[in-house]
Image (cartoon, helix red, strand yellow):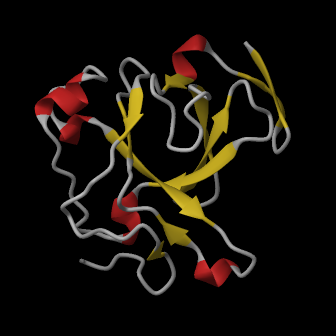
Amino acid sequence: MRVMTRRFGELEVADNEIITFPRGILGFEEVRQYVLLEGSGPFGFLQAIDEPDLTFVVVDPRVIVRKYRIEVARHVVGEIGIEDVNEAVVLTIVTIPAEPRNMTINLQAPLLVNSSNGQAKQVVLTDHGYDLRHPVFGAVGQSA
């Protein structure tokens, strides 16, 4: 499938590369299909298939916070076809302000991806004490 994007131009995306969020991502519930593209260093891009202007910068939160852990009920991850959260690819959305040194990641609402079937969901962690805007710089590899 050919996908037109503003940031990357035209992309050729195989069906098995499509990641589907049946409920969307918070604030973008109507956009359900994405492709994960490699970026620079630990960062990647979650590009919307049907919205050329919609791209999220994402990162594995454990690169920033080494001891980051998610605990969710089995039925929550069961919705994307896995039995345990440890089977999922875990990503967090990166916010990059005008001053990149102030970049943050959202540890409260990680994205869980089942890489074997392409199903994904965003979960909201309410009792872990994680920040909505956790700083990236000065925090890389911290053990919190």
Image quarter where the C terminus lies is bottom left
Question: Quadrant of the rendered structure where residue 62 is?
Answer: bottom left
Q: Residue 66 in the image: state x and y as whole percent.
A: 28, 69
Q: Residue 119 in the image: state x and y as whole percent.
A: 40, 23
Image quarter where the N terminus lies is top right
Position of 15 with respect to 65 (left or right) is right
In the rendered view, would you say 93 is above or below 6? Answer: below
Q: Residue 140 in the image: state x and y as whole percent.
A: 42, 77
Q: Residue furthest bottom?
A: 138
Q: Residue at x 30, y 68 (%)?
A: 130
In the rendered view, would you say 14 is above or below 41? Answer: above
Q: Residue 55 in the image: state x and y as whole percent.
A: 69, 44
Position of 25 with respect to 121 (left or right) is right
Question: Quadrant of the rendered structure where residue 38 is?
Answer: top right
Q: Residue at x 13, y 32 (%)?
A: 74
Question: Quadrant of the rendered structure where residue 6 is?
Answer: top right
In the rendered view, would you say 104 is above or below 33? Answer: below
Viewer-closest of 60 and 33: 33
Q: Residue at x 55, y 61 (%)?
A: 94
